Amino acid sequence: MAHTTRYATHDTVNGATAGTQRVVARGETAPLRLFCFHHAGGSAWSFAGWERRLGPGIEVVPVSLFPRSVSVPGSPGSVSTMDDLVREVAGRFAPAFDEPYAFYGHSMGALVAYGVAQRRLAAGRRPPACFVTGAHRAPHLPAPELTTDLSDTAALELLLGLGGAGRLLRENPRRMRAAVDRLRQDLLVSATYRHPAEGHRPLPCPVHVLHGSDDPLVPLAHAAAWNRHAAGSFSLRVMPGGHFFHKEHQGLFFEELRRSLRTADAGHRR
């Protein structure tokens, strides 16, 4: 009889909290679980439809990050540093990591995913079978300056300029304000990350880096520098598009993601 582990996720849509609950069965043959970490200013809804696009054998688990609050530190139920965010996410999903799993992190999500993977390694726990990152520099490199006195207008211009907000955001002031607030807090949280001077362990799994050829925030050399964090196989794929290349060229993106995940799937079925 299979044991079950329940973990709750939450997200905010149009200012209201939408609660969901996923059930993970343990003790049964399970597909590879792909935990997806969203970009700054985004949400778990960013990954709607991914399971259908990736096809059978891959269970997509969108990660809803804990509420971020740097402007008002200590707000109940929120986190204000990257270390706190990583700790909370790693703890919430720990039981689900006992079965084969992989990570995909986009932009800020790559940094969160990397932190969770490092926390697993430090604890001697099962690492991801595959680590895929998109639109983020290698974690040991300094971050670009995006957080200094970021006004609502500047935050919105950043979202629109990077392709992270569309027509619905422009036409819905309430949703627009929520997205701007999330972006500001996420950038402030990301800015608290400090790569450890020692204790770093390269990831003992395939590391695949996806990079937009026209990304204004991540130079190609900074994406390629992820090879420093791979103990095993490493690949870098330059995709057409900007910071949100996965939205601009979805067919090509999912084809490449499936190819990357096949390395994990083959490994855990041996």
Image (cartoon, grey):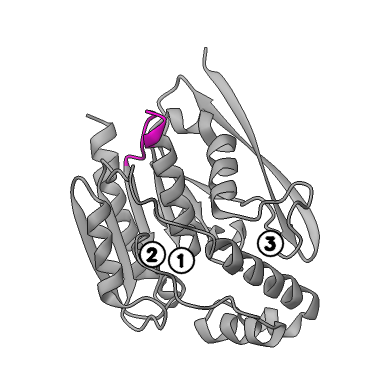
Q: Residue furthest left?
A: 233
Q: Which mark is residue 228?
A: none
Q: How crowded is mark 2: few (under 14 residues within 10 Å), some or many (20 or more)?
A: many
Image x and y of residue 3, in percent? 55, 18
| Label 2 sits on residue | 134
Q: Position of residue 113 (x, y in %)?
A: 45, 50
Q: Can residue 56 be seen in this view?
A: no
Label ID, residue 107: 1
Q: What stretch is highlighted in magenta?
A: 121-129
Measure how far apart labels 3 and 1 are at the Cα level: 19 Å
Q: Are marks 2 and 1 in contact (CB under 8 Å)?
A: yes
Which of labels 3 and 1 is toward the front?
A: 3
The alpha-carbon separation of the residues under discs 2 and 3 comes to 25 Å
Q: Which of marks 2 and 1 is nearer the N terminus?
A: 1
The quarter holding residue 147 reads bottom right
Q: Which mark is residue 70?
A: 3
Secondary element at tag 1: loop
Residue 127 colored magenta?
yes
Residue 215 percent location from the top left of the image: 38, 80
Q: Is mark 2 on a helix, strand or loop?
A: strand
